[in-house]
Amino acid sequence: MNFSYQDALAYYGISGAHPGSLSLTKRILQQEIVFPNMRILDAGCGTGQTSSYIAKTYPSKVYAIDSHAEMIQRSKHRFSKERLPISLYHASMENMPFRSSTFDLVLAESSTAFTNIPRTVSEYYRVLKENGVLITIDMTAEPNLSPDARHKIKQFYGVNAVLTEKEWIHTFKRAGFHTVKTLKAATIFDELATPHHSEANPEGSNKSAPSHPAADLMLTMHHKLSMQYGSSLGYRVFRITK
């Protein structure tokens, strides 16, 4: 079985591996109006760090979904330990087990790019209520990313595409979303230069896990790619309205 970058994150239980970590998520959510009984979906919840934070901070109904079995187990353990009433689903984001028009807010942190992007974005649109909000944080190709670099990144992360900002926006609008706003744009080097930078939050990590050669290799390769393409690969934070 091939060992992926996501497998490595799951093995060590690394939380907040998306750019900006949980601190960025907190700043984004502070700008949103979260009302009582609001239905929020953490799409690609990983170890459940963000879902947990939302459930403990806002008077909302939190749902979490992930397709990775180990991530689901880590989220389940976290929610049980913290006694949080979060509805957890082990399912594909391309075919989510929710009725149409269920959620007021969908949050996807570095998860959409690891799926069939057009299909997942269409699912976001389907499960959101009218005027619902989608917030995504995802890997983005800068204009100077070469075809060779794009190919290497796709191979390593096992993704179908590395989209530019314009391509992301086109994908959202093609799915039916009417308003797309870029809240933040940064390269990897920009992010590394920020004082609050944290590539991966060790909170919740499995410190007792024995070293795993395949997992260590994937994390090392991830770091090398980040350094090699730090000026031509970045991320965007999008706020999209249905």
Image (spheres, rainbow, N blue to C red):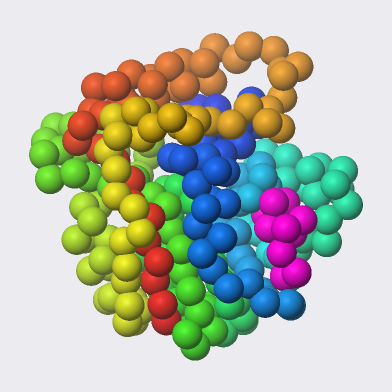
**Could you tell whether 202 is left or right of 214 in the image?**
right
Vertical arrangement, residue 140 with respect to residue 41, above or below: above
- Which corner quadrant holds the C terminus? bottom left
Q: How many marks?
A: 0
Is 105 in front, or is 93?
105
Vertical arrangement, residue 111 with respect to residue 232, above or below: below
**Could you tell whether 153 is left or right of 137 in the image?**
left
Vertical arrangement, residue 155 with respect to residue 87, above or below: above
Task: Residue 47 in the image: state x and y as whole percent.
Answer: 66, 42
Q: Magenta part mainly helix, strand or loop?
A: helix
Is 107 in front, or is 54?
54
Task: Residue 14 in the image: state x and y as whole percent.
Answer: 61, 31
Task: Residue 139 in the image: state x and y as whole percent.
Answer: 34, 45
Q: Residue furthest bottom?
A: 130
Instruction: Please say whether residue 119 is visible from this viewpoint.
Output: no
The image quadrant that residue 181 belongs to is bottom left
The magenta segment: 51-60
- Residue depicted at x 48% and y 74%: 133
**Could you tell whether 127 is left or right of 195 in the image?**
right
**Could you tell whether 79 is left or right of 188 in the image?**
right
- Residue depicted at x 69% and y 51%: 53
- Residue depicted at x 75% and y 69%: 59
Is 86 in front, or is 6?
86
Instruction: Please say whether residue 171 is visible from this viewpoint.
Output: yes
Is 110 one of the magenta-colored residues? no
- Residue depicted at x 43% and y 30%: 195
